[in-house]
Amino acid sequence: MSSSSDLSFAPPADLRWLYVDFNSYFASVEQQLNPALRSKPIAVVPVDTDSTCAIAASYEAKAFGVKTGTMIYEAKKMCPDLICVMAGHERYVEFHERIIDEVDRHIPVTQVCSIDEMACKLMKNEMSVSRVTEIANSIKTGIAKNIGEYVRCSIGIATSKYLAKVATDMKKPDGFTILNPKDVPNRLLELELRDLPGIGANMELRLNKAGIHDMEKLLSLQPKHLRAVWGSIWGEKMWYYLRGYDLPDRETERNSVGHSHVLSPEMRPPEKAYTIARRLTMKAAARLRRMGLYAGALSVSYRTENGPRIGLEVRCEPSQDSFTFQQLLDDLWQELQKESKSARIKKVNIVLQRLVEAKNLQTQPDLFDVLKPKTENKKRAKDEKLSAAKRSDEGS
């Protein structure tokens, strides 16, 4: 068997991903909402019966061996003081949206991977250990302050999204782990096979039958061998994932960039909700510039406290400057207010659509552009320059 020094690793040299994984998410939300549950062993259950299983367990319950999937009648034997709490899907979704908004304040969320996990791609000026540590600490501080101190997360940093997720599991709860490229082989050798995302109980049995019982053996195999063991392309992908390569997702084309926000009661009057809508629009435009995209439409919608969801969309020339979208928001908001009759607003959604990459923009002005007043064209050029300057500040 090969030693770790013989393993062929040639991962990218830069730290490229930050991954956030919330610890015992459902149970943590319940403890945050109910002080009586804090520091207590609790299990979140779908129905009030001992014949069901836990869908989440607090770390206090995990200390007794209770985990997701444990039957409640068994869990109560392990932990006689276990408190069972009925799951509240709406509560978890509301916290999820607030959490995304909070993380977005510190670094744009590139992908929401699940209700309690999200990935953020680092820009060049964010790849140093010192800078990414600063970002991670600011995320944790912001969550504690604005979401709640009992909603904790583990943050992983690595060259790929996959390894960044692996890093989040290396220290829980409330962990922070950086997988530097040079340390990847040895750090992975510390893990069990089941520690890797994508290897469950059944896959572990298959690996064992193929003579793979530990990480050193897994890492010594070639891509085609792993593909044969897995019986699919996933095995070959694992070879690259474990070496820090970032394979493209199957999703090939993004068609929108947006943000939504559930408003706290004090922010639901229309004039206050509007300030949130403006902030969401600025964030969406900033993300657009970060991705090197232009948008040709803005959609604005909101749900009132006691009424239906209403929304409007307007198209525009492909743009990425905040000023253009802010002006469009102003017009749409006035129209929406006429329809909702100034009702209190519960949730706001801002979506930039009809996206196009910069390289695909028309290089020559169309007839509509030519007929525009010169003053309007000059203003647009000025706005684009200002946004370009802002993009430079953002590190794009």
Image (cartoon, rainbow, N blue to C red):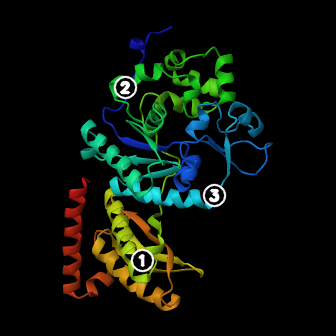
Work out how far the residue at label 3 is from the one at label 2, CA to CA, in angstroms: 43 Å
**Disc 3: which residue:** 89
Q: Label 2, secondary structure: give it.
A: loop
Q: Please indicate, yes or no, whether residue 144 appears anywhere in the rendered image.
A: yes
Q: Amino acid at mark 1?
A: Ala
Residue 297 coordinates in the image, percent (x, y): 42, 74
Query: Which numbered mark, 3 or 2, is in the foreground of this view?
Result: 3
Q: Are marks 3 and 1 in contact (CB under 8 Å)?
A: no
Residue ID at (18%, 80%): 378
Query: Which numbered mark, 1 or 2, is in the foreground of this view?
Result: 1
The quarter of the rendered structure image containing the C terminus is: bottom left
Work out how far the residue at label 3 is from the one at label 1, CA to CA, in angstroms: 25 Å
The circle on residue 7 is none
Residue ID at (22%, 63%): 390
Q: Amino acid at mark 2?
A: Ala
Give whichever of 364, 37 is nearer the camera.
37
Q: Give the mark, 3 or 1, whose residue is nearer the N terminus.
A: 3
| Residue 174 vertical position relative to residue 110 in the rendered view, above or below | above
Give whichever of 186, 273 is nearer the camera.
273
**Disc 1: which residue:** 273
Residue 133 coordinates in the image, percent (x, y): 30, 40
**Disc 2: which residue:** 10
In the image as oriented, which residue stretches furthest toward the top?
Answer: 1
Packing grade of label 2 (10 A; few <14, some 14-19, many >=20) is: few
